[in-house]
Image (tube, rainbow, N blue to C red):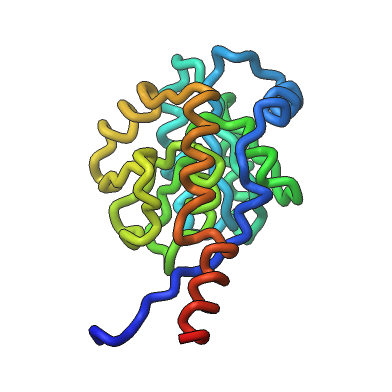
Amino acid sequence: WKEGVVIYNGIDLDAFQFNVDVRKAYRRKLGVNDSTKVVINVGRCTDQKNHNFILNRAKELAAENLLFVIIGEGPLFQALQNRIKNEGISNVRMLGKQFDVPQWLCAADIFMFPSIYEGLGIVAIEAQANGLPVLSTNSIPLETDMHIGIFYRIALKNVESWRRLLCCVNIDCATRRQKSTEAYNSKYNIRNVVKEVEQIYMK
C-alpha cells in the first residue's frame, strides 16, 4: 500500500464559491434580514438524512432568531411537512427540489448535516467550498472535513452541543470568502485532482 496513491473525489467547486451579492439576493427571497441566522440542509427526505433531528432542534430553539431551511424531495417530504404544520414549527421552510443549491448555500450561515450515515458526504464538502460552517454527526467519514476550520463533528446524542453551536457559530462575509478560497485550493477541487492524475500517468 505504500506504493499506492489516494485520489480524492474530484468535485467541480467553481459554482460553490461564496458570493456576497448572491447572498443578499437569496436572503431577500427568504424574507430575512442580516440578524437572522439561516441554517440549511440539502438532502433527500429519507430516514438516513435524519430531518426529524433538524425539526426537533428547530422546536427547541423557537425563541432564537433562527430559520431552518431544508432543500430536497423524497419519500418523507410530505410527512415532514405534516409534522411542521401539526406541531406549529414556524421557523422551518421546506423548499423541495431546487436547481440553484450553490446560491442557497450563499444565503445560509450554517450547514446542518445530521445524517445517520454517509458514504462520503459530498454536499458537506460543497458547503465548505462555500465557506459555510458545517455541523455534522461524528459518524460521517473523516475525509469529509476539508480541514479549513469550519467543520464540527458532534455525536447525535449530544443534543446540548448541537443547540449551543447552532446559536453561537458565526462567520462574517470576509471570513466566508477566505474559507471559500482555501476550500477551492484543496485536494477535492477537480482541477487539482486532474493535475494529480496527469502527473501520475506522466511518470
**Residue 79 in the image, given as x and y percentages of width and height:** 59, 49
| Drawn side of residue 45 relative to residue 162, left or right | right
Q: Is residue 112 above or below residue 10?
A: above
Q: Taking the image as drawn, is residue 59 in sight?
A: yes
Q: Residue at x 28, y 37 (%)?
A: 159
| Drawn side of residue 14 relative to residue 67, left or right | right
Q: Splitting the image into 4 quarters, where does residue 86 fall?
A: top right
Q: Residue at x 40, y 57 (%)?
A: 144
Q: Taking the image as drawn, is residue 86 in sight?
A: no
Q: How many marks?
A: 0
Q: As rendered, which of 136 and 68 lies closer to the eye?
A: 136
**Residue 4 in the image, given as x and y percentages of width and height:** 32, 85
In the rendered image, the quadrant that contains the C terminus is bottom left
**Residue 35 in the image, given as x and y percentages of width and height:** 55, 12
| Drawn side of residue 168 relative to residue 93, left or right | left
Q: Is residue 159 above or below residue 156?
A: above
Q: As rendered, which of 77 and 191 lies closer to the eye?
A: 191
Q: As rendered, which of 70 and 15 lies closer to the eye?
A: 15
Q: Which residue is drawn at 28% across and 44% down?
A: 154
In the orientation shown, which residue stands out farthest toward the front? Answer: 203
In the rendered image, the quadrant that contains the N terminus is bottom left
**Residue 124 in the image, given as x and y percentages of width and height:** 48, 51
Q: Splitting the image into 4 quarters, where does residue 19 fall?
A: top right
Q: Which residue is drawn at 45% across and 61% down?
A: 187
